[in-house]
Amino acid sequence: MKPVRRAGQIAGARQVPSPNCDSRPAGTAVTLLVLHSISLPRGEYGGEAIERLFTNRLDLSAHACLVTLAGLRVSAHFLVRRDGELVQFVPLAARAWHAGASRWRGRERCNDFSIGVELEGTDDSAFTKEQYSGLARLVKSLYLELPIREIAAHSDVAPGRKSDPGTQFDWARLLAALASQI
């Protein structure tokens, strides 16, 4: 388990600060974790493109598909790489810009009350055992520090607009990994 350090950082997570965040509304409890998937370019893993996107340093000329991201300002609190490495972009107390126009159980603007976790992958490919293990450790740590009560897919909070983490995400495997952490 990775305990939370000062300033809302998870111990053991590589810190890559993103400017794409701001303050949550006063008094807002963080009760939701939103799971995403991302790869840049699509289906390519291990490069720096995700980190560069979340820090506004993406070279749009590096691949033809990246030009559609021009001017985009997004972030997540965490990225779980294919090898299980945990990268943190935004402190827990801050609002990351990950869910966009979203709604969960009647509440709009999920960024206000959620933690965003990106899994390196696509919405139509399997995730690695290292990612499930790393994600379970992260979720357990977050449960100990925040009043998170639910986990949802990006596709659940932005239906029709988003499809990640996708049909290949194994929810039963995550639940089993969480159970083994107890």
Image (spheres, rainbow, N blue to C red):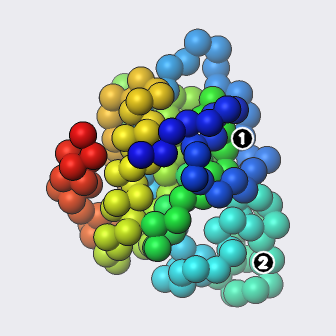
Residue to which mark 2 is pinned: 60
Q: In this view, does 88 lie above or below 114?
A: below
Q: Residue furthest top?
A: 27
User: Do the CB atoms of the residues marked 2 and 1 lie less than 8 Å apart?
Assistant: no
- Secondary structure at badge 2 equals helix
Residue 101 seen in the current view: no
Percent x, y of residue 54: 70, 58
Residue 121 seen in the current view: yes
Q: Residue at x 45, y 36 (%)?
A: 142
Percent x, y of residue 107: 43, 25
Percent x, y of residue 162: 44, 57
Q: Label 2 is placed on what type of residue?
A: Leu
Q: Which residue is drawn at 41% across and 30% down?
A: 144
* Quadrant placement of the C terminus: top left
Q: In this view, does 82 lie to the left or right of 159?
A: right
Q: Label 1 is placed on what type of residue?
A: Cys
- Based on the displayed image, in which of its 4 quarters is residue 5 positioned? top right
- Based on the displayed image, in which of its 4 quarters is residue 61 positioned? bottom right
Q: Which residue is drawn at 75% across and 50% down?
A: 17
Q: In this view, does 42 lie above or below 161?
A: below
Q: Is residue 150 left or right of residue 52?
A: left
**Res 123 label:** none
- Secondary structure at badge 1 equals strand
Label 2 neighbour load within 10 Å: few <14, some 14-19, many 20+ = some
Of residue 162 and residue 132, the one placed in the foreground of this image is 132
Q: Distance between the residues labelled 2 and 1?
A: 22 Å
Of labels 2 and 1, earlier in sequence is 1
Q: In this view, does 38 lie to the left or right of 132?
A: right
Residue to which mark 1 is pinned: 21
